[in-house]
Amino acid sequence: MNVADSERVSSALEHLGYNYTPVIEEADVVVLNTCVVRQSAEEKAYGRLTTLWPTKRARPEMVINLMGCLVGIRDNPKLHKRFPYVDVFSAPSDPGPLVEYLIEHHGHAVDTAETVRRYAVMDGDLVLPEPAVGKQVIGWIPVVYGCSHACTYCIIPYRRGIEHSRPPEEILKEARALAAQGIKEVTLLGQIVDRYSLDNPTYPTLARLMNQISEIDGIERIRFLTSHPNWMNDELLDCVAENPKVMPHIEIPNQAGDDTVIENMKRGYTADQYRRLVQKIRARIPGVSIATDIIVGFPGETDQQFRNTYDLLAELKLDSVHLARYSARAGTVSERTMVDDVSEDEKWERFRAIEKLQEGIFAEIHAAYLNKEVTVLFEEKMKNRWKGRTPNNKLVFVDGDESLLGQVRQVHIYWTGPWSMIGKLA
């Protein structure tokens, strides 16, 4: 989501006449787009803001814009007081305050200002920022902003607001614009992306929206994230199974494998319901890959409750696990009503236990691809290798000087490891 937001801000700035620079000391405008889903991310944002102060002091005309979840949807006087050298504070996914500030203080032409204001309200117009032109084949399209589910540990509803879906015509317009600029694959984004249109029955379901996007010339692959077990329905599974442009990869977090912990997280399902959902997905979509999120060390999590999570992962053998240690986020239900009573040492021990388990599982899954051919969309060159992904999101590298950017090619896999595979063009 932050990548998508940042691209839109960059595009708006370019329409105001700014050019990209990789050197902060040369910049007239610096936008720090922040995430606070974990304490470590918030601390990183504070650290980056602090390092900007000497540059701002040396060049007071430089505009600093703090954007994203650190700012949130409500005015934060404490943040203003702590960082008085920040010129503009912007809520998540809202480039409007920065655009208005620059228009007001830098005297841009009226017609230019009105054009950029359209970008700020996100009406579907999108021109890729200059650094991405001709170099990017993957695009991200937010379809649901905010979240109304309010898991007890989650800060997102407080920082991004209640859930609201974007109008389908804007999304389709954006997908067409991206396709016209060389984007081959789009990922539809939402905190709970499956809930697209539930706040507005006149909008199509997520499945129907993806079917409409698949009709756009140039779009070859469609993905969506993140899902929630409670809203993964048959229509959506049928869409993935039957539409060749919708990739067979599903991100569906369970967060824990113990019923008491899941209930304390206010997730709304049981470990067995999650197990049966995984079985259902695999039966309906052959070759599908499934990713999950896991939080270890949630308040009150006992050794046995952690073992239940570990055992469920060992049983299901999922394709990817985004792993995190619990960190209390100020204002959330868990921070206000629960005691963070699992020590940091114990959190790290549990983290590493699952990490080791999953490394073995990933290696086993990837080993099944050895000496086989897979279809890969190549995204970028990293050092002397081209990087791409299979339809089910397996990371593949290929050596070669020939440009493979944006190409979909068959690759013969000759090496596999837990995190990626290496092959040669078939």
Image: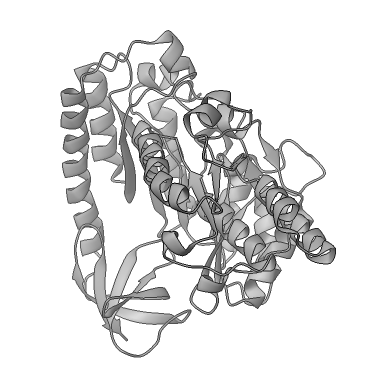
Residue 288 horizontal/vertical position (percent): 42, 56
Position of the C terminus, as image quadrant, is bottom left
Residue 133 figure quarter: bottom right
Residue 172 horizontal/vertical position (percent): 72, 62
Judge whether 167 appears above or below 344 on screen: below
Residue depicted at x 24% and y 18%? 342
Residue 260 horizontal/vertical position (percent): 37, 16
Residue depicted at x 58% and y 33%? 72
Judge whether 232 appears above or below 332 on screen: below
**339 or 306, which is in the foreground?**
339
Residue 123 visible in rendering: no
Residue occupying the far bottom of the picture = 402
Relative to 284, is 346 on the left or the right?
left
Residue 359 horizontal/vertical position (percent): 19, 49
Residue depicted at x 34% and y 43%? 322
Residue 335 figure quarter: top left
Relative to 239, is 264 on the left or the right?
left
Residue depicted at x 17% and y 37%? 352
**413 or 57, which is in the foreground?**
57
**213 or 335, which is in the foreground?**
335
Residue 15 visible in rendering: yes
